[in-house]
Amino acid sequence: MGGSPLDAVVMAGGLGTRLQMGEKPMVRLLDRPLISWVVSALRESSIERIFVAATASVPETMQWAGDKGIEVVETPGAGYVPDMIYAVEEAGIDEPVLIVMADLPLLRGDIVDEIIEVYENVLEPALSVHAPLEIYQRIGGKPDALFNYRGRFIVPSGVNVLLGSKIRLEQEDYHLILDRAELAVNVNSPEDLAICESILRGDLKI
């Protein structure tokens, strides 16, 4: 699949109700907003254009993205999947598109490119990225969702590649399982934030 540079949509409409620290994408990690870490990773990768999908509930996030010269798509706030569909269609993306959560601050550009490279060599129109459960046991994290895939427990990372022209359809996806702690910490709680801080400071080895 693919062959040309992909666009990326950063899903950034979260309110962070469990964190209780204001708009979730703007929660500070080592004095930088969570979304800043994700955008930096995308800019260090082969991704061509970056869009931020956000709702009226996160005005600081939209302001931050606009100040950074990133195109913002204001979504209706109807839920993750409807807002993702809306954002891809409003951005006019028909080609494969990388969808990534704004709460994945350990993501790096080389990991993004590794995901894209795998996608370009699979037959499926879509790709979903997962981390094995063993990573969470190593770093002390608690996954929000857990699936048994061919006898192995895996956790969705919040990174997917989908075909934009079929964004309203259910797309068969290739399950990419990467043993990378960088993909295993979605910041949903103060504990998750603390794990990220420990990894970034070098106190917790991955």
Image (cartoon, rainbow, N blue to C red):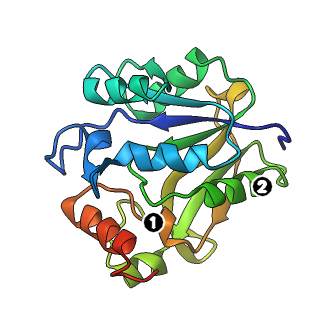
Up/down of 107 relative to 194, above or below: above
Report the residue at 25% width, 46% height from top.
27
Q: Is residue 182 left or right of residue 115?
A: left
Mark 2 neighbour class, 10 Å CA radius: few under 14, some 14 to 19, many 20 or more? some
SS assignment at label 1? loop
Q: Is residue 13 above or below residue 191?
A: above
Which residue is the site of mark 1? 184
3D distance between C-alphas at marks 1 and 2: 20 Å
Secondary structure at numbered mark 2: helix
Q: Is residue 142 visible?
A: no
- In the displayed image of the protein, which residue is found farthest to the left? 20
In the rendered image, the quadrant that contains the N terminus is top right
Query: Circle 1: is it few (<14), some (14-19), or many (20+) Cα within 10 Å?
Result: many
Amino acid carrying label 2: it is Glu
Q: Is residue 122 visible?
A: yes
Label number found at residue 31: none
- On the image, the x and y values in percent for residue 164 come to 68, 28
Disc 2 marks which residue? Answer: 117
Amino acid at pointer 1: Ala
Give the mark nearer the N terminus: 1 vs 2.
2
Q: Residue at x 28, y 64 (%)?
A: 192
Residue drawn at x 82%, y 37% is 4
Tell which of 165 and 66 is nearer to you.
66
Q: Give coordinates of residue 86: x percent, y percent.
A: 51, 20
Taking the spot 78% from the left edge, 48% from the top edge, the residue there is 124
Residue 161, image x and y in percent?
65, 44
Q: Tell me: residue 25, above or below residue 168.
A: below
Reply above or below: 173 against 165: below
Q: Where, by quadrant of the figure, is residue 75 drawn?
A: top left
- Determine which quarter of the picture holds residue 179: bottom right
1 and 2 marks in contact (CB < 8 Å): no
Q: How many marks?
A: 2
